[in-house]
Image (cartoon, grey):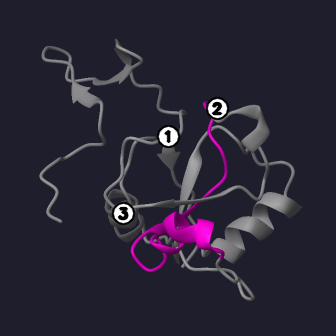
Amino acid sequence: MTQERSAPRYWSRHPESRAWMVERFGTLRTLNPDEAVRHVTLYEAQAWCVWAGRRLPAESEWELAATQNRGLQWGALREWTATPYEPYAGFAAAPSDSDVVGRFGTHQAVRGVSFASPARLRHVRARWARLPEDDLSFIGFRTCAP
């Protein structure tokens, strides 16, 4: 898929000051440089990693960091991983799992929860399957040293 954008969804330049602006829930405001980037595709996250000399964490690395390092802020956004969405070892599909099974190999593993996630889904091991071009969900990313 070809992307023609030069910035994440909902970002724009102020026409006079050229400051970055961001639309949040229908309101345009100046972008906070300390705020995590959100509404980015897997491709945008990967492109940033190439530019910065970094990489996305594997799903196992993400989970280890999330469960072992309590000092990091978790739960503001879901996060892309470098791992395709595949079943865990030992997974045996039931007839009701057709939607989940249909995502294996075509979607990317996204970990964590966002501030918009229902309380019943808020868990450090939350796992999602998203298409690489998805930028509508509250998804951001973390990076690792190469």
Give how far across and how far down residue 90 sits, in percent. 75, 88
Determine if the magenta segment contains residue 104: yes
Q: In this view, does 107 lie to the left or right of 124?
A: left
Give how far across and how far down residue 145 sits, in percent. 58, 73
Q: What stretch is highlighted in magenta?
A: 94-116
In percent of the image, x 78 and y 53: which residue is there? 124
Can residue 144 be seen here? no
In percent of the image, x 42 and y 17: which residue is there? 25
Q: How far apart are marks 1 and 2 (CA)?
A: 8 Å
Q: Nearer the viewer, residue 122 or 41?
A: 122
Say what secondary structure mark 2 lies in. loop
Amino acid under disc 3: Pro
Amino acid under disc 1: Phe
Q: Nearer the viewer, residue 141 or 71?
A: 141
Give how far across and how far down residue 76 sits, in percent. 64, 37
Quarter location, residue 24: top left
Q: In this view, does 118 lie above or below 109?
A: above
Give how far across and how far down residue 84 sits, in percent. 49, 77
Q: Mark 3 points at which residue?
A: 132
Q: Mark 2 points at which residue?
A: 115
Q: Nearer the viewer, residue 99 or 63?
A: 99
In percent of the image, x 53 and y 39: which residue is there? 36
Q: Is residue 133 above or below residue 16?
A: below
Quarter location, residue 110: bottom right
Amino acid under disc 2: Phe
Callout 1–callout 2 Cβ contact below 8 Å: yes
User: Is tag 1's residue or tag 2's residue first in the polypeptide sequence?
Assistant: 2
Residue 67 got which mark? none
Is disc 2 surrounded by few (<14), some (14 to 19) or many (20+) residues within 10 Å? few
Q: Is residue 143 above or below residue 88?
A: above
Picture quarter with the C terminus: bottom right
Say what secondary structure mark 3 lies in. loop
